[in-house]
Amino acid sequence: MKKNSRTAIFPVAGLGTRFLPITKVMPKEMLPIVDKPLIQYAIEEAKEAGIEEFILVTGKGKSIIEDHFDDAFELGTSLSKGRKINELRDVEGSTIGSGELFYTRQVKPLGLGHAIWCARRFVREQPFVVIAPDDLVLSTRGCLSQMMDVYDEVGGNLVAVENVPKNQTHKYGILDVTSDDGKIVGAKALIEKPLPAEAPSTLSIIGRYILHPEVFTYLESHEVGKGGEIQLTDAIAKTMDRVPFHGFRFKGERFDCGSKIGFLAANIAYALKRNDLGGNVREILKEKYNLG
Ligand code: G1P
């Protein structure tokens, strides 16, 4: 059995330019899906998959994320005095214990590959996980837990993939597919954000990766790729001759919550699934908007 990773990196330094004006001061990772910020969903998915060390690569204006995961002593005291047990559980559930959460700054916005490189000193010689919090996956078993199962068999570099419409390939890392059994996909190359006409497939990387530390040898060189940025996709591609690569078709529905439409769709989907809200939401959609 291969040793699964216990360390996850969360790149949260992005400016959120697709979601202005709210992201002018509010980090996009703090946008709520119903009542929980995106970053908390990402951390919970990682916890479920056995992650014990959480590394946030942050930037200017992101310190509210640190506060969110901190102990809220006064609020906790007031809630327990008022016997607000559920609320207290929610507040305590979003606290991360001492020595488990780490922060490092991406001092310059040089791309996703550079953000991951910023966390290099936390990773050492073990495989590690990368989760992009704006990619939210609604599923029975967490996307990362599903990946961990497959990683046990294949090791190397493993990325979550899904098909996107042909006219969307310029937004994603795309696989040049060599084999596909419907669950695990082999590839001979990875192309970052190709135009539809140049894309070798429509199978795209989404924000979940289990990576071999070998990718750092490439990230170290700070080679610039698509869009003038240091790309994680390029680093993975450059190790393909030494480190096995696989794409994994996860079970679940993925929402791009860095876009307004993806965020709205996620809020509806998550609210509909909630026991305390689903019925009311369904009623509103039906009665007021004649939908569903
Ligand atoms: C990044 C990666 C891209 C990947 C995408 C998934 O792009 O560079 O390969 O497909 O995340 O969300 P970004 O969305 O940061 O531009």
Image: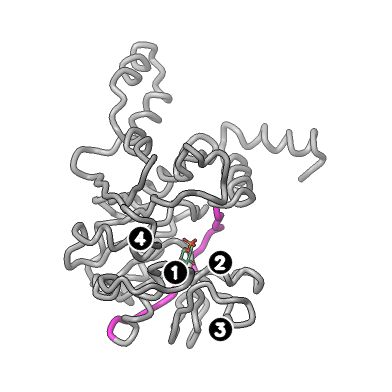
Q: Residue at x 25, y 44 (%)?
A: 101
Residue at position x 25%, y 57% in the image: 7
Can you tell me whether the CB of the residue at mark 2 lies under 8 Å from the nearest atom of ligand 1? yes
Report which residue position mark 2 lands on: 171
What amino acid is labelled 2 in the image? Lys
User: Dot 1 corresponds to which residue?
Assistant: 228
Place of residue 146 in the rendered image (x, y in percent of width and height, measured from the top left) = 41, 63
Q: Quadrant of residue 154?
A: bottom left
Q: Is residue 253 above or below residue 96?
A: below
Q: Tell me the mark number nearer the camera, choosing from 1 and 2.
A: 1
Q: Which residue is mark 3?
A: 200
Give the spatial CA distance, label 4 vs label 3: 24 Å
Could you tell me if residue 176 is visible in this image?
yes
Residue ID at (40%, 30%): 90
- The local crowd at label 2, few if under 14, some if 14 to 19, many if 20 or more residues have their Cα within 10 Å, is some
Task: Tell me if the residue at label 1 has its CB under 8 Å from ligand 1.
Answer: no
- Could you tell me if the residues under marks 3 and 2 are in contact, i.e. CB atoms within 8 Å? no
Residues at marks 1 and 2 touching, judged by CB atoms closer than 8 Å: no
Task: Using the rendered image of the protein, determine whether residue 139 is visible from the camera's viewpoint.
Answer: no
Instruction: Identify the amino acid type marked 4.
Output: Val
Q: Which one is closest to the eye, mark 4 or mark 2?
A: 2
Q: First in sequence: mark 4 or mark 3?
A: 4
